[in-house]
Image: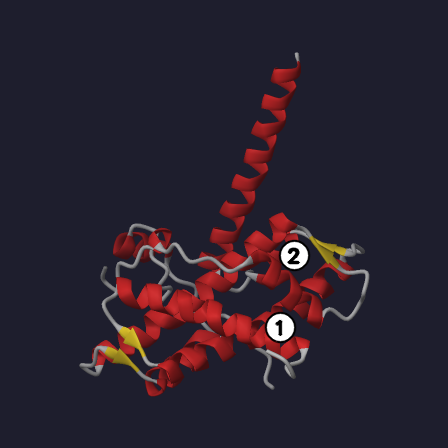
Amino acid sequence: MDGLNHEEKLRLTVHSEVRKMCREVGGQIKMELDKDAVSVIAELVWRKMCVISQDLEHFAKHAKRSTINAEDVKLLARRNPSLRAIVCRMADDAVKKKRQNKEKATEDLS
Amino acid sequence: MDIEGYDISKLTSKFKIEALREILKVHFVDSKTRITEDTLQLVAEVVRVLTTEATLRAGRQAHIEGMTEVRVSHVEKILPQLVSDDVMPCNPVDHQVCCGGNCCLYLQDAGFHMTND
């Protein structure tokens, strides 16, 4: 991997993660993806990550924060009700879990 | 598993969180911008859904054409709908009925908005 700059290495990582996921989904739906098809999907994911990154940063900045949080990700998903529902559900579950862990920790102490 | 009834909870692959952090960092404009691990998990899920959706739609296109191997041409055909912003939201009733709410094939409402490069 010498001679590859940081961005190129990250692109390769995305490609390998996407390939792994496409293979698993492909296996589950009994279809194979040829390597060029996987490359196109990986490129799509890479570009989407670039846009996501900039959007999230802007949303946080707009809210006068420097740390991106769940509200920013929910905003990202605003145009797709199903995706937004997934993000909201996952964020709520994480909050619930944290609260439960905190309660348990306080119980253990007392 | 069927494409139409695909259940994403059966998908074990997940994006590496630290790799995701690095990738997002590269595109931040402000060096002070941070993202927590919990938030990264959410972003990872968004990316996971995108990848799965692209694969399922391309797979469905290949299936429609009577093939079992997904090619670039199939991916190309489904890209516009996948990234389009001008979509009608999926009717929640139909969505529930057709896939028990777990399906990731949001047929009518992709809306993965992309800027034009």
The spot of residue A64 in percent (x, y) is 81, 56
Q: Chain of mark 1?
A: A
Type of amino acid at the residue the image marks with label 2: Asp
The spot of residue B8 in percent (x, y) is 36, 56
Residue placed farthest to the left in the image? B66
Among the 4 quarters of the image, the one containing residue B13: bottom left
Of residues B18 and A1, the one nearer the viewer is: A1
Instruction: Determine the residue positioned at 46% across, 62% down.
Output: B48
Q: Which mark is residue A72?
A: 2
Instruction: Determine the residue positioned at 60% across, 75% down.
Output: A9
**SS under mark 2:** helix
The answer to whether the residue labelled 2 contacts the one labelled 1, judged by CB atoms less than 8 Å apart, is no
Residue placed farthest to the top in the image? A110
Q: Is residue A12 left or right of residue B62?
A: right
Please identify the quadrant where the N terminus of chain B is shown: bottom left
Real-space Cα distance between discs 2 and 1? 13 Å
Among the 4 quarters of the image, the one containing residue B17: bottom right
State whether residue B84 appears in this view: no
Instruction: Determine the residue positioned at 61% across, 68% down.
Output: A52
Q: Which mark is residue A51?
A: 1
Q: Is residue B64 left or right of residue A72?
A: left
* Total numbered labels: 2
From the image, state whether disc 2 or disc 1 is nearer to you. Answer: 1
